[in-house]
Image (cartoon, grey):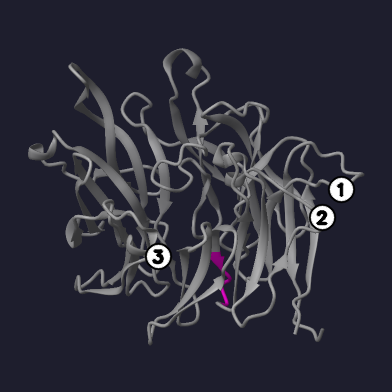
Amino acid sequence: MAVKVETEKLVPGKVEILLPRFSPDGQKISYIRLTDPDALNELRDLGCLSVMEARTRQELLDIKGDLVALNYRERGRGYLDLMPVWSPDSRFVYFHYDDPAWESIGPRWSLYRADLSTGHVIRMPFSIDEYRVNTVDVSPTGKFLALNTRQRWKPYERKFFWKSTRRMILADQLVVCGPGGEDPVNVIEWPNDRLHQSENLGDFHWSPSADLLAYIVRFREGRYKEECFLNVYDPETRSVREIFRTTEHLDHFTWTPDGASILFHTRDPRAQKSSRRYSIFRVSPTTGESQKLTDHQEFFYPIAPEKGDRILLETHLEAGGRGISLMEVSGGAISTVVRTGYNLYPAWAPSGDAFVYLRTKPDAKPFWTWPAEPVLQMVEGNPPVKLAPVDSSSRLTSCRPIFSPDGRTVLFVAKDESEDAQARFPGLWISRILDLSPE
């Protein structure tokens, strides 16, 4: 059996396009257009937000002239910090608008909300002098927002040989508020006895089945001394529960689709070999019971599908590079599916019978300039299918593929390198996965 894929260009690359996303109902597509795509050495780019109808390709929203802050090259907590976020009902999209005077006062931005039903764009009620809003996550009911803000002034001391520098810096805080920014609540109470340690907020996500927020807090003292917490916050009762604690590094986690478990990996910073570095856990957010699925092996970044009983794992390969493995939840058996190359950002299809990932080749250049191509892989062992119709490539961070909610189409960013192509920069492409047919 062979997989048939039909790919076409959705938006040409007249300027660089990145961060495409489907709305939760699959009817709309949002993406960013960079206004200065040649500024490769900048840590932060400015772009314009666009929203289009997926079926008719009609433009629904175009934020022109208004700068949308975008620091997608600063990896931060491991994923894109300032990307636009949809509400569960696909009516609102949250995005960041930059202060026009940022050159003189430093990078500062505000959070905005666009209403796709009326076309109105409003500024969220967070003062730019009190809140630096970064990542936004919307609860599954749409009643709450979780915001990573930098609003706490804390003492910071830097030692370099005999010289010590002391100053006040902005530090992380996690804020939960209503969909319009009303009634903000600071979730984390940072303990005073840890102020001498390096402290920051890790990954945070809402449960897909309830308004329950899980988040990671890290405290680091010295090179190898670290303590990480995985906590759960209930916005209805405003209560916080600790469900996991570890002295190994903890930075990412993912919920299972039913909201009954949280999957994550810990990393031992003292391990020199990648095959003895990571441990995968599954923990219950209600009881706090944890189960270690792998113990100091080469597997990390577990991802659970909406359907099925297999978990995607990224894998350190013996010959170097990064592969992709599948683990059976019931028996715990692990099989490596992608064994060669350097493969990143695997994402499940909603049906759980396929996944898409980026295949790239590292070089001496910065990682965001690595050429990459999206590849579709069926779970049942069919050969991988290259989604791009020509030898296409894109900067690594802007090429992450994403499935539509029905799992029949894939969005990705790629540069058309055919002889007759006029696009200088990566554009937006769409691949439609057709039914299986005999070879």
Q: Mark 1 or mark 3: which comes first in sequence?
A: 3
Q: Which span of residues is magenta-colored?
A: 347-351
Mark 1–mark 2 Cα distance, whole angstroms, equals: 6 Å
As drawn, 162 above or below 211: above
Q: Is residue 276 visible?
A: yes
Q: Which residue is drawn at 66% across and 27% down?
A: 36
Q: Mark 3 or mark 2: which comes first in sequence?
A: 3
Q: Residue at x 55, y 53 (%)?
A: 91
Quarter of the rendering occupied by the N terminus: bottom right
Amino acid type shown at disc 2? Val
Q: Position of residue 133 (x, y in %)?
A: 39, 36
Mark 1–mark 3 Cα distance, whole angstroms, equals: 38 Å
Q: Mark 1 or mark 2: which comes first in sequence?
A: 2
Q: Is the magenta stretch mostly helix, strand or loop?
A: loop
What residue is pinned by disc 3? 298
Q: Residue furthest top?
A: 104
Q: Is mark 3 on a helix, strand or loop?
A: loop
Number of residues whose C-alpha sits closer than 10 Å to that of mark 1, classed few (under 14), some (14–19) or many (20 or more)? few
What residue is pinned by disc 1? 418
What residue is pinned by disc 2? 390
Amino acid type shown at disc 3? Glu
Q: Residue furthest front?
A: 319
Q: Where is residue 282 in the image (x, y as percent from the top left)?
A: 30, 72
> Considering depth in this image, is 288 or 269 the residue closer to the camera?
269
Q: Is residue 187 visible?
A: no
